[in-house]
Amino acid sequence: MQFLEYSFPLLGLAFTSTQGWTFLFVIITFMIYLYIGWASRAQESGEFYVAGQGVPAIANGAATAADWMSAASFISMAGLISALGSDGSFYLLGWTGGYVLLAMLLAPYLRKFGQYTVPDFVAKRYYSETARIVAAICAVFISITYVAGQMRGVGIVFARFLEVETWQGVVIGMFIVGVFAVLGGMKGITWTQVVQFFVLIAAFLIPTIALSDILTGNPVPQVGFATGDIAEKVNKIQEDLGFAAYTQPFTNYDQINVLLITLALMTGTAGLPHVIVRFYTVANVRAARYSAFWALLFIALLYTSAPVLAMFARYSILETLNNAKIGEMVHDEDTDVDYYPIYQVNAEGKEEVVPWVSNWQKTGLITIDDKNKDGILSLKNVDGNFDEVTIDKDILVLATPEIAKLSPWVIAIVATGGLAAALSTAAGLLLVISSSMAHDLYVHFVEPEASEPRRLLIARIMIIGAIFVAGYFGIYPPGFIGQVVAFAFGLAAASFFPAIFLGIFDKRMNREGATAGMIIGVLFTAVYIIACRSDKILGTAEPLMAPWFTGSSWMPGGLRPEAAGAVGLLLNFAVALTISRITSPPPDDVQDLVESVRIPRGSHAPEAHFDETDAEADNP
């Protein structure tokens, strides 16, 4: 099938190239981000860490959605679902379910504690500076792992659409995010993320709507997906090539790994420090609840569209590349890269080059290998992969508008949206690293009497240091975006979720149990991930350890590193509950604090009149 070009002629008069449009959109959005950072300069630590706790609920909802919908959501998730088929849905279910868990179960109670950071909460709830140190180290470890995926996303977008080296793209992203994060802290980051949300959601929905109209005749993606026949077409092509049907479950991941990864992603989402801190930026508990509602609504716009775009992308690739003609190798002087032009027959029966394949080959994210030298590209199944082409999972969303021959401005806005998604989350993560190092460690243990200007200076220095660490891992990533982010979620699940959950709902949980649980959970998860992925993380020739249970009948592929967080979570719960029951209970004032947080102050019996002003009692 040949795709029609979806275009807006009036806009197309301004530029004819994707690169021109991309430059335009990137310059405009980056100037807006820089202006917001400058205009929102923080003058005190309350503004730097929690934006003065004066962010409106709807704005905080948009900022939370942008903070949470990272490069993994925008760039990698649809690519993973597209590559894995039904099995990839655990990313969608885990991340969405985890946000609901956070918004409904934890966020309002955390806001009532009134702290700046997750380590602050841990220290107050567990009356322990040792627990603060453990929590701060966990927050830094999680955030550095997570931010590595964001910087990789920035590098991919710049490498393809602005035709610079990947490392150069990462450096540019480091500079931009550094300006509005260093100057404005949470205040600058919040209002930048509000803008970035609208950029990324428009960038995701425009091509999805266009493709839905082209492929199903219905511009509403969810309706076109449900009523059209794309799923049947994709299943048939997949089966003809030797793959399992796209909609058949458990073809790439066994059931136990799917369950464990989903659990790790859900509880990891609920324990992410950069998302939790967003609920400290509003005025009271009521505003925290409303901002959670708005964030969930905004997130649903992208997350209900992602599986639709994933299937469209899979269909487009299969239809475009299978049995296409492979041309003679060409050397590109600008990028100094060799690539193979790919040709297909158009509607008029003439051969024409498929430009998107050449463009992505120049970045190194698509490779062609004509194994049988017949000049025909084969996508047949070989060990679960295409026979003669390797496509990086992280490019599918970015490449789909090009595959479908959409107008250059549509392709460019998708690239801009990818940058917005990566930079918005990177900014939130950098602030967590800064607050953990400066507020939770330096100010509490090195210079407790530091003045406000001194505290801000230290916080900004820590952000700059974190940017350089993030940039390094963006240039040398330990995996593709979705996988790196899944590791971060596993670490959050194994460390923070039990400590937060038990801290709210189990007043018998004490500092010994919580601290030991966090240490055991995060150590197990980190060691398992590093050992199984040491070839990527440590540079060893081979992984130090094969996944546990590899070759077993019930888990043939072994316990995947992405699933380790669920095991760490269970270990954390078991250790924390056991130790807390064999050691002294928390002081009475701590138990009273837990009770007061769970039961709203100023509540009345069901028959009593409720005065709206009582809501303010939620935040004394």
Image (tube, rainbow, N blue to C red):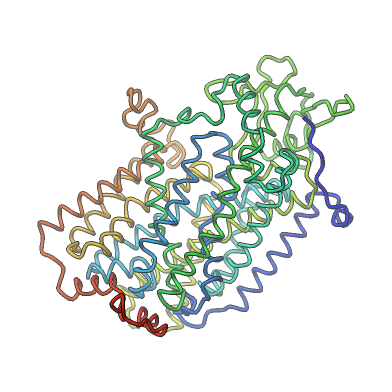
Identify the image quadrant of the N terminus.
top right
Residue placed at 28% from the left, 77% from the top?
605
> Hey, which quadrant is residue 588 in on the image?
bottom left
> Hey, which quadrant is residue 125 in on the image?
bottom left
Residue 189 in sight from this viewpoint: yes
Percent coordinates x, y for residue 180 in the rendering: 58, 70
State the residue in front, 317 or 93. Answer: 93
Percent coordinates x, y for residue 219 in the rendering: 72, 47
> Hey, which quadrant is residue 528 in on the image?
top left
Q: Is residue 553 left or right of residue 400?
A: left
Q: Work out whether 29 lies above or below 311.
A: below
Percent coordinates x, y for residue 153 in the rendering: 59, 50
State the residue in front, 198 or 352. Answer: 198
Q: Work out whether 89 lies above or below 131.
A: above
Q: Is residue 145 left or right of residue 177?
A: left
Residue placed at 54% from the left, 49% from the top?
72
